[in-house]
Amino acid sequence: MNFIQYILQNRGQVLELTLEHLWLVGVSTLLATVMGVPMGIAIAHRRGLDKPVLAGANIIQTIPSLALFGFLLPVPWLGARADRLAILALTLYALLPVIRNTYTGIRGVDPAVVEAGRGMGLTESQLLFQVELPLAVSVILSGVRVAIVISVGLATIAAAIGAGGLGEFIFRGLAMVNNQLILAGAIPAALLALSADVGVGWLERRLRPR
Amino acid sequence: MLDEVPAIQFRDVAYSVRGVPVISGLNLRVRRGETLVLLGRSGSGKTTALKLVNRLLTPSAGEVRVNGVANGQDVVRLRRGIGYVIQEVGLFPHFSVERNIGLVPRIEGWPEAKIRARVAELLRAVGLEAKITSRYPHELSGGQRQRVGVARALAADPAILLMDEPFGALDPLTRDELQREFLSLQQRLHKTVVFVTHDLREALRLGTRIALMEAGRLVSVLSPEEFLRSTEPWVLAYVRAFGEGPQSSAIRGSL
Amino acid sequence: MMNHRQRKVSVAPVRVSGKTPCGPQPNSIVPVLTIAILLLTSCSPSHSNRIVIGSKNFTESMILGEVMAQEIEARAHLKVERRFYLAGTYICHQAILAGRIDVYPEYTGTAVTAILKSKPSGDRAAVYGQVKSEYEHHLELTLGPAFGFNDTFAMEIRGEDARRLNIRTLSQAAALTPQWRAGFGYEFMERPDGYRGLATVYGLHFAGPPRIMDLGLLARALQNHQIDLAAGNATDGLIPALDLFVLEDDRHYFPPYEAVPVIRLQTLRQHPEVASALAELADKISDEEMQRLNFAVDGQRRDVQQVVREFLQKKGLIQ
């Protein structure tokens, strides 16, 4: 039977692994956004912080993912649970796109607009929430989109250390030399990444300032 | 007028950036209800002086007083009471005209109906049609945008208006229109205006007094007529640069 | 004409109101996004109406997994999902801790050394008790009754060599190791209860470093004289088939490796019938029977489900 029949026959398991995958991606992207956006705002407003922070996030990105999973395994509380570890690693990898895009988005706001706003008596927080963020939101979302797509891919590798998700199909399929299993993992994962890309991309376009 | 508190006062104000002086020894009084033009070439410090009034910049020495009070405290409240118009206009692209103009009244908590009425009133005052309220800045021409900018600055009815080369980016015809409308508005509103420009003709037309700045120092403060007749070297140089002579009439007040 | 005097707003009492204008126009997007994110993050996996059985990535583990699956389906009448061929002890352990699987087959020796990272406390019964107690107290897991065989590491040599050199034990073989090449799987190389300890206890010194290869290839490499000693499993189906000889562990280096089901305590609470189903399997598979099952799947390449069904039927465990 081809892999579509396999997926249909085992749809319970496919669904379960997909949900596990979404859990890994969802939590890590959320954490990366919650941490990364404020960091991006902070370095956009303060000169001198931008280079070290962006460089740091960049270094994390260059570590091969499987190696990072391996480093973190012996760490006491983290390594005890593979999904915890995977979520941490995925969050770290998602940080760079979020921070960098937030920084670019905020810096990209027309300085005349910011000056006019400040001159009119907007507080710094009003300026941030009513002017800078709304104008930067499309660029920030673009960073979140990249983070999600990266995470979907990395989460498949996380199955190698026991975090579950669609990667498990792939690894089991490789071990048993079973193509259907491999595809049952690979195709849904690719579809996940694609739909996230398209979906968030649509949102970006809708929120782009005229 | 009696000896009243000046709307704005610079007392021995200096401003430097990383050790380089941009303004030094500035002493200047702006009277209530006058239009004081800060005139000078680029780098003369005129824009810097303007920004010291609403504390977008902080003096390195000396004191700036607004309505008799040093302006270093509660900067946000200070700025809400001062209208600010800049050359690039700086309208919020994601707000409609109505929300741009109504911004300060809204954050001051005015009731909606009052805000809408105020916006309509201001649009009339700056010569724009009422139906423009739902448009967005990118749909407006340069002239329309700057009119909205002025309306926005006037929305909360501030006593003081700061204008930094507001008409500099417009074509000559539109600039002429807006200058005339400014004069007409001023006749009705009598705001205290500090107006920055490098254009002598604009200064002569709009200012009750002209403060000439050069290299961060105040050279002279003169009425337009005095300015044209003055023999001070920098003033003369400026007048000559613009091809004006004592024979040209100060267009002050002519619409 | 503008009546500005009527509009005069004093600057002094400034009230920064909470009624601020909303930011971007799509106000409806924010609640939608929030809901979407909340949904995503609540996808935390859980399944209460099925039993998920895992297994490691080799034939014997899969056979045991299938045995348990069919028994639970027949006895407990529960729907069983199979997640077989998970890549190793750590993966299975993580999966059961996280609740992604409910049951999987483990070996007591492996649980002691590789998972609990401690030392085996004695003989088969003692080690079983040690693991069960640790699992129940700290990991929310427990052990079912043992299946009945001891799949310890088997140090295999060719039958002809054993007869020719007249050796039966590892101690006797130790003297010959400088002339031999060894082949091991990676788990055996890396585990604390693997090669390192063995070489120390018996004084093994091989000619070169041991070759590391897939478990499935070791027996053939031995047969083809590519290696002279292999670390296989005691229940390997190829041992009788290829005339291989298992050297005796006379110094009792290897801990017992009784095959047992590992079960989540939560699963037992929700489905106590699982316990009774697994109890039926206690002591039902001997070393020889496991070897034959392994050979049927590995050597004869028969379908696992078929092989297991026949075996359970023959034993009278299912219809």
Image (tube, rainbow, N blue to C red):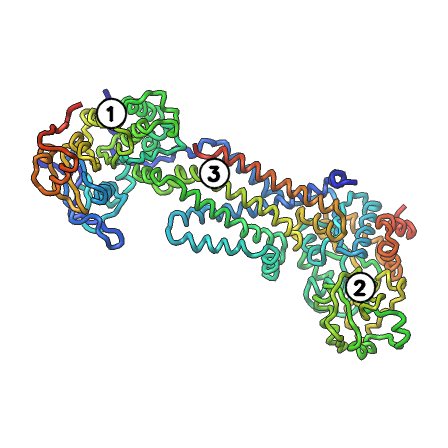
| Left or right of residue B80, residue A184 in this image | right
Q: Position of residue C3 (x, y in %)?
A: 23, 22
Question: Do the residues at pointers 3 and 2 share their chain?
Answer: no
Q: Which residue is mark 2?
A: C218
| Left or right of residue C252, residue B176 in this image | left
Identify whether B44 is placed above or below C173: above
Q: Which residue is mark 3?
A: A138
Depth check: give the residue in front, B73 or A168. Answer: A168
Farthest residue toward the bottom?
C175
Label 2 sits on what residue type? Leu
| Left or right of residue B54, residue C270 in this image | right
Which chain hosts label 2?
Answer: C
Numbered label attached to residue B177: 1
Q: Residue at x 57, y 39 (%)?
A: A197
Spatial separation of the CA atoms under disc 1 and disc 2: 94 Å
Numbered label attached to residue A124: none
Residue C189 visible from this viewpoint = yes
- For the C terminus of chain C, which image quadrant? top right
Depth check: give the residue in front, A66 or C188. Answer: A66
- For the N terminus of chain C, which image quadrant? top left
Asked if the residue at tag 3 contacts the one at tag 1, i.e. Cβ–Cβ closer than 8 Å, the answer is: no
Question: Do the residues at pointers 1 and 3 share their chain?
Answer: no
Question: Do the residues at pointers 1 and 2 share their chain?
Answer: no
Label 3 sits on what residue type? Ser
Helix, strand, or loop for circle 2? helix
Helix, strand, or loop for circle 1? helix
Dot 3 crowding, Cα within 10 Å, few <14, some 14–19, many 20+: many
The quadrant in which residue A161 appears is: bottom right
Label 1 sits on what residue type? Glu
Residue C129 visible from this viewpoint = no
